[in-house]
Image: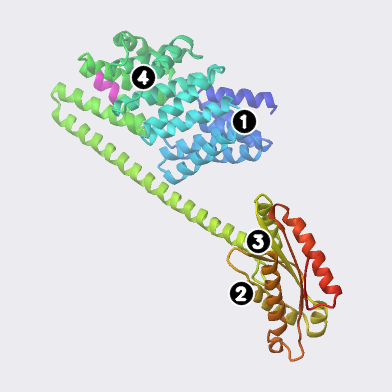
Amino acid sequence: MSGSDITALVREARQRTMTGEIGPLLERLDAAIAGPLDAADRGSLLLARAVAMQGEDDPSGPARDAAEAARLLQAAGRPNEAAYAAAGAAVFAQRAGQHEEAVNHAVASMVLQSQSTEVDPEWVRSANGLGILFGQLSAFEMAVRSGTEAFAASALDHVTREITAYTLCFLVVESLHGEIAVDAEPAIEAARWLSESGETTAARTVLGPGMLAELTLLDRHDADVQAIAAAIEPRLDELVPRLRAWAQLVLGSIARRFGELTVAVAHLDAALPVLIGIGDEHRIVRAYSERAEAKAALGDTAGAFVDARACTRYVRRNQLDLVGQLSVQIRQRADLEIARAALRRRADDLAQEAAVDALTGVGSRRWMERLLDRLGSQGGQGAVVLVDLDHFKSVNDRFGHHAGDLTLQAVGRILRDSVRDGDHVARLGGEEFVIIAPGTPAEVATQLAERIRTEIEAAPWHEIDPELRVTASAGVAHGPLASVREVIRVADAALYDAKRAGRNRVAAA
């Protein structure tokens, strides 16, 4: 199958979300999916099949198709289409009662959206799908915000705009039925656009007028709802089942409003099985409520009681579902925070490992380099002491590297115990150490170096080996911390003078 054939098939599947028989279309989609395809084309076709089947009684199949499509499309480098597939998977999973999967897919879609560099029709569809999901979760303010963004961004694509217009109307209408204070004007604009400029005949003659009727029944618009009802009814068979059920709900509401109670019950009788089949919880509750009131007005109190109980049952179930979803989100949030805390601890551990020399316990060379950068931006004076063990190579050669390591550890302890608070000590490498002492006069630093030299010479090295003797030489320099690296260079020259003069001594620049 050529790329243009695949594009045409995908477009047809998306157009059929409003109207048309999908049986032959599904056969063609299945045949195409079974053929040789790359990951991107297979993902697009799986998504198209999920979209085409969204009105079916069992949403778990479309949920699986959309989830696999999202995986393939993301791997193929098509993030916006993958975001749309993930949003679709979230919607279908939510309808199937797979709440944890719905949350995961929704998060994936939002992450992909956030990484997008282009707002194209696929991005718009993903925003539209998230709006539908938020509506299913009764998060109507978020739903209307997503729906409004999707509708506004769809201005250049009629097919996408038709879908986003209908979704925005649905979200605003359900928000108002739920007594959520949202602005109805965007929905009125969207319904008018459907009525006047919709891509399909069904959009112009049923979807747009039907939504204007819904808004009129909610006292947010002023349309001739009886004329709308008369125009919609002959076109019911042109709609896919889920939209036909919605239209019958609208017709039932209009009929009840104008006292045509038997007609109202008939429309609602036809709408409810489909609404229940697709799990449209909000409209199920509305349909039961409308039918209960119509039956009560007809004198069928028993039937009205049954519908009222069913309405209560669905409201209760929806509440429990939302609590369950909240529990899932709490658990996922807790898992995320636990993982973040572990990462922070690991980052702290790694930072500590990078800052401390593992053998001697003093600062590492990397840490000292960062310190020198900071000190270089400060004012004031300070002293530098460089300490280097004398003939340390012979320690390793004669007594072994283990003895050498124990020696360096002991020197590290001496240095740590010798410096004051505010002084900084690090191992520069091998057997060489540096002390940076901000605010310390040269003569005090020289005394510190001499004390360290004496302590190293007098340390109980015989505990490591009876014949081990260790001494050290030191170089001292003083100067502005703004030029601390130059002060270190001067101290290094002084250390060289101490070595040349016979070692085991301190030389000050």
**Mark before the other along the chain sequence, 4 or 3:** 4
What are the residue bounds of the magenta stretch? 264-269
Secondary structure under the numbered disc 2 in the rendered image: helix
Question: Which of the 4 image quadrants contains residue 71?
Answer: top right
Q: Which residue is mark 4?
A: 184
Instruction: Answer with left or right where residue 278 lies relative to residue 3.
Output: left
Label 1 close to label 2 by CB (< 8 Å): no
Instruction: Estimate the x, y position of residue 226 in percent, counting from the top left.
Output: 29, 10
Q: Residues within 10 Å of mark 4 (few under 14, many from 20)?
A: some
Earlier sequence position, callout 1 versus callout 3: 1
Nearer-the-camera pick, 108 or 379: 379
| Secondary structure under the numbered disc 4 in the rendered image | loop
Q: Residues within 10 Å of mark 3 (few under 14, many from 20)?
A: some
Cα distance in 3D space between marks 4 and 3: 58 Å
Badge 2 crowding class, 10 Å Cα cut-off, few under 14, some 14 to 19, many 20 or more, is few
Q: Which residue carries the number 3 mark?
A: 354
Residue type indicated by callout 4: Ala
Nearest to viewer (mark 2 / mark 4)? 2
Q: Residue 13 location, x and y as percent?
A: 55, 25
User: Mark 1 touching mark 3, by CB under 8 A?
Assistant: no
**Foreground pick, 90 / 227:** 90
Disc 2 designates what residue?
Answer: 417
- SS at mark 1 in the image: loop
Q: Earlier in the sequence, mark 4 or mark 1?
A: 1
For label 1, the residue is: 117
